[in-house]
Amino acid sequence: MDVETMDGHSGGGGEIAAHHSENHLVAVFVNEHPVKLLGQSATGKQIKTAAIEQGAPIKLNFVLTEALPDAERRVVEDHERVHLCEHLRFIAREGAHRVITVTVNEQPVKLHGHKATGAEIKAAAIAQGVAIQPNFVVHEELPNGTSRTVGDIDEVHLREHLRFTAIAPDDNS
């Protein structure tokens, strides 16, 4: 669903929602600037676009992070969908995270941030043209010549030159 934006000139982000409608208006904040979005979810790119259209001083190439409880933050990728609820807070900054290039099945894959799960590694590889499927099994190639399996929810701390292989689950090689 595409997110439609409003002009952003009414009140300071007050409570606006029609909870029984799929297209309810939700007020979130980007860099403390109120941004109104229509719908139940939006991608990172849609949130940044709406913020720009509503006067937030950010650029589309900024990195968007969601402020979580306990002062934690998580990066929201441009293609990633976020469930919208009132008063979500986002921070958009230039160069807020790093891009790491790893190898998946001998092909370079760019990943963002300091860590990624096996599922995120596969999704990035598929999006960047590596011929694998989401059900493939990921193995991290270790410096000593062995490997370890990286499950879909297992996190890997990213650093340059990490090497992964992704093989079909029925491949016994």
Image (tube, grey):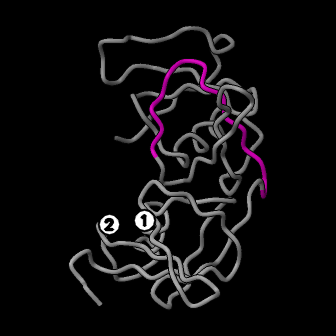
Q: Which residue is mark 1?
A: 123
| Quadrant of the rendered image containing residue 7 | top right
Residue 168 percent across, percent down from the top left:
27, 78
Identify the residue at the far left of this view.
170
Q: Residue at x 46, y 20 (%)?
A: 25
Above or below 33: residue 151: below
Mark 1 nearby-residue class (10 Å; few <14, some 14–19, many ≥20): some
Q: Split into 4 quadrants, where in the image is the N terminus?
A: top left
Q: Horizontal placement of 147 versus 35: left or right?
A: left
Q: Split into 4 quadrants, where in the image is the C terminus?
A: bottom left
Q: Residue at x 64, y 15 (%)?
A: 13
In 3D space, how far apart are the residues under numbered discs 2 and 1 (Cα atoms)? 7 Å
Q: Horizontal placement of 137 versus 7: left or right?
A: left
| Quadrant of the rendered image containing residue 21 | top left
Residue 161 percent across, percent down from the top left:
67, 83
Q: Residue at x 58, y 47 (%)?
A: 76
Which numbered tag is attached to residue 134? 2
Residue 63 percent across, percent down from the top left:
69, 52
Q: Amino acid at mark 1?
A: Ala
Q: Residue at x 62, y 23 (%)?
A: 8
Which numbered tag is attached to residue 34? none
Q: Amino acid at mark 2?
A: Pro
**Does the segment drawn in magenta span residue 91?**
yes
| Label pair 2/1, CB-CB below 8 angstroms | yes
Above or below 65: residue 119: below
Residue 44 percent across, percent down from the top left:
55, 46
Q: Which numbered disc, 2 or 1, marks the residue that appears first in the sequence?
A: 1
Secondary structure at badge 2 equals loop
Q: Which residues are magenta?
A: 81-95
Above or below 63: residue 105: below
Secondary structure at badge 1 equals helix
Of the pair 51 and 111, the residue shown nearer to us: 111
